């Protein structure tokens, strides 16, 4: 009998298990962000619920007083999203109910303005201490402390084991790091083999003044429009030795590189930016129900991108009048009169003058040993864009057109491929000319990689503070300034200010575009609903342009921007000196672009008149405010 009872019990459990295994099991859970801002909307997500299950969520303070309530219904996948606004800072307790399931937890709520403190601290420390790495560590630490609370020591550990580690673990970030290290290795081989010395020798036959060097850097920046990273590499590597010879300060060279790289890429009809820009416009149009073709909207927005256009015009005026002002004038005067292209105590992010990279005195070098690897890197990146874009379009089922190829191209992979091919070309050129032995070539390549270590650290910290700002909802707090009752006339101007503020805080123009575009386009569409079709299209296009131009403006002003860092790297400049000298110029251009461009055109000034007036005003500012910079009268052609 006992054996029979055990068998029945076994078959009973087996039958129950079979019945249960055939039915879906649900275990819902609620996910909250690390921290919320008082008075700002916070997004709460749920997953694992039965489809179509009503979910109720309520918040209360430590005394049990109600703070907010929200309701949602799980979709077919069992997921749900709600947005609530918690009115006060402190620990908020939440309780949720979904059918027979329930749960509870707590969420830290901090004052909204605290979200601005980490980037502001990083910027202040960078300007005060002139140590950008230490300043970024301070900003990331403060952000980690605001997020986690408690003692200040544990957040210091999070700087390394969480934020910095996550920054380097990101695939796109790793590709940028690999791109930077490979380029450093390529430049190390080129420099050691005398390639840059040969380029300087050839260019010196045509470029015979410090102004000629600056014009050459400016024109090269306009020609390398395919990508801002490739621009900084090519212009920096080519012009830096020549700029040193004609006593052009490293600060001015970094400014020329930085102010042609992103603006040119922002305006280019072919390049790595256009696919991303059109994609964020298209997604925002789809969400807002706008029928305008995204690529056509992109083209219409070009004349309204006042900051990139005026930034390029401003450089031309500086070179035509041979004038500078402020910190840049002091840097140029120092370089021309003393030959010191770097300020006293400057710490360039990359050193191209170390003993392991300098060529022997007897080695004149070959132009092709420098030009061929750099061109190979550039053309390799372009070829990578075409290759990845072509197969990406096929995989996506899109027709193979120029637009679809650019939209589906992988710019990060393409840049890595180009840098790798540049390294191979550099080693082959050195081997063919027998300028260096195999061991010397490898040592030079390692030395070039080593010269980029500090740059890689700073890039990682810049990405880390961007992640801190994302966790603190810094961008969302700044976007909130646009919400409420906003007149359509002021929408483009306010959008520019908001985009500039976000980009300055997070150090990323692309990140700003992806955050702000989905908010600005529906806002413009809603505010102009009662206007005629022509006015609706104007404000829509002007708002799109404001996002794209404002993001570039804030990126230029921010010391934690990756393009600003890369400009310092390839110019061989002290990073803080670069930011300090560039900032007044960027602010002058930004103010003129905002007043003459965004504000005046919204009040009826034709765009062609705004462009002409802005260019003339900038020329007048340079002429009246700027001071003549000394000419270098020495013999720069001697080898």
Image (cartoon, grey):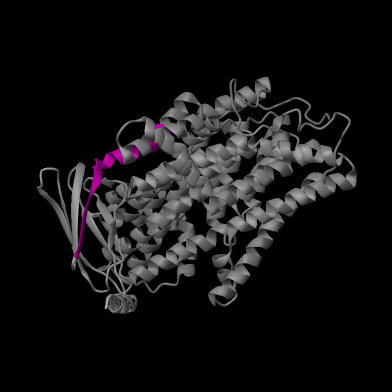
Say left or right for 156 vs 429: left
Say left or right for 426 vs 140: right
Judge by depth and name the residue closer to the eye, 482 or 617.
482
Name the quadrant containing residue 71: bottom left
Q: Position of residue 567 (x, y in %)?
A: 59, 40
Q: Position of residue 602 (x, y in %)?
A: 34, 56
Judge by depth and name the residue closer to the eye, 334 or 515.
515
Q: Which residues are magenta?
A: 101-123
Say left or right for 363 vs 508: right
- Residue at 34% x, 45% y is 472
Say left or right for 255 vs 291: right
Asked whether the viewer can see residue 590, the reply is: no
Assign the C terminus to one quadrant of the image.
top right
Name the quadrant containing residue 150: top left
Q: Position of residue 4 (x, y in %)?
A: 29, 79
Assign the N terminus to one quadrant of the image.
bottom left
Residue 120 magenta-highlighted: yes
Judge by depth and name the residue closer to the eye, 552 or 8.
8
Judge by depth and name the residue closer to the eye, 533 or 270.
270
Could you tell me how many numbered marks the image carries?
0
- Residue at 71% x, 42% y is 185
Q: In the rendered image of this protein, does residue 323 appear above or below residue 42?
A: above
- Residue at 60% x, 46% y is 177
Name the quadrant containing residue 153: top left
Residue 398 magenta-highlighted: no
Asked whether the viewer can see residue 369, the reply is: yes
């Amino acid at each position: 009998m006992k054996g029979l009872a055990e068998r029945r019990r076994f078959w009973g459990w087996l039958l129950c298990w079979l019945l249960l295994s055939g039915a879906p099991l649900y275990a819902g859970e609620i996910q909250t962000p690390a921290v919320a801002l008082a008075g700002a909307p916070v997004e709460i997500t749920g997953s694992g619920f039965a489809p179509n299950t009503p979910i109720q969520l309520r918040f209360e303070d430590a005394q049990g007083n109600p703070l907010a309530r929200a309701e949602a219904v799980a979709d077919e996948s069992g997921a749900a999203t709600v947005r609530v606004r918690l009115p006060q800072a402190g620990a908020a307790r939440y309780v949720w109910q979904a059918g027979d399931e329930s749960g509870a937890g707590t969420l830290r709520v901090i004052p909204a303005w605290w979200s601005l403190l980490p980037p502001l601290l990083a910027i202040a420390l960078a300007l005060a201490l002139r140590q950008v790495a230490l300043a970024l560590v301070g900003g990331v630490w403060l952000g980690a402390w605001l997020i986690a609370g408690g003692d200040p020591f544990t957040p210091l550990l999070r700087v390394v084991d969480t934020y910095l580690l996550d920054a380097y673990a990101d695939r796109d970030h790793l590709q940028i790091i690999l791109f930077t290290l490979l380029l450093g290795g390529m430049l190390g081989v080129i420099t050691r083999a005398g390639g840059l010395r040969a380029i300087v020798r050839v260019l010196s036959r045509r470029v015979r003044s410090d102004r000629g060097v600056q014009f050459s850097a400016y024109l090269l920046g306009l020609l390398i429009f395919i990508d801002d990273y490739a621009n900084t590499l090519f212009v920096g590597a080519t012009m830096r030795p020549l700029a040193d010879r004609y006593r052009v300060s490293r600060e001015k060279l970094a400014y020329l590189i930085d102010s042609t790289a992103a603006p040119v890429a922002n305006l280019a009809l072919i390049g790595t930016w256009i696919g991303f820009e059109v994609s964020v416009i298209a997604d925002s149009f789809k969400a807002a129900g706008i029928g305008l073709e995204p690529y056509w909207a992109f083209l219409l927005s070009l004349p309204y991108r006042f900051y990139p256009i005026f930034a390029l015009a401003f450089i031309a005026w500086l070179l035509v009048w041979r004038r500078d002002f402020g910190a840049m004038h002091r840097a140029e005067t120092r370089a021309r009169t003393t030959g010191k292209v770097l300020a006293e105590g400057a710490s360039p992010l990359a050193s191209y003058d170390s003993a392991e990279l300098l060529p022997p005195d007897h080695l004149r070098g070959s132009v092709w040993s420098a030009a061929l690897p750099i061109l190979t890197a550039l053309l390799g990146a372009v070829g990578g864009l075409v290759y990845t874009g072509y197969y990406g379009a096929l995989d996506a089922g899109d027709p193979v057109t120029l637009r679809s190829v650019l939209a589906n191209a992988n710019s990060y992979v393409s840049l890595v491929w180009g840098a790798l091919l540049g390294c191979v070309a550099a080693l082959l050129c050195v081997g063919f000319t027998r300028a260096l032995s195999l061991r010397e070539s490898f040592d030079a390549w390692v030395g070039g990689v080593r010269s980029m270590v500090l740059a890689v650290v700073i890039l990682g910290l810049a990405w880390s503070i961007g992640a801190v700002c994302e966790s603190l909802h810094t961008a969302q707090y700044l976007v909130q300034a646009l919400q409420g009752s906003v007149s359509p006339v002021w929408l483009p101007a306010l959008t520019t200010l908001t985009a500039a503020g976000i980009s300055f805080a997070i150090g990323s123009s692309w990140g700003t575009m992806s955050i702000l575009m989905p908010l600005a386009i529906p806002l413009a569409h809603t505010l102009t609903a009662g206007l005629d079709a022509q006015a609706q299209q104007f404000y829509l296009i002007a708002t799109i342009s404001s996002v794209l131009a404002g993001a570039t403006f804030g990126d230029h002003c921010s010391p934690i921007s990756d393009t600003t860092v890369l400009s310092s790297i390839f110019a061989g400049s002290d990073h803080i000196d670069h930011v300090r000298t560039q900032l007044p110029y960027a602010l002058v251009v930004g103010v003129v672009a905002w007043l003459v461009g965004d504000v005046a055109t919204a009040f009826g000034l034709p765009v062609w008149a705004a462009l002409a007036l802005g260019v003339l005003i900038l020329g007048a500012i340079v002429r009246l405010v700027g001071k003549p910079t000394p000419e270098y009268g020495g013999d720069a052609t001697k080898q």
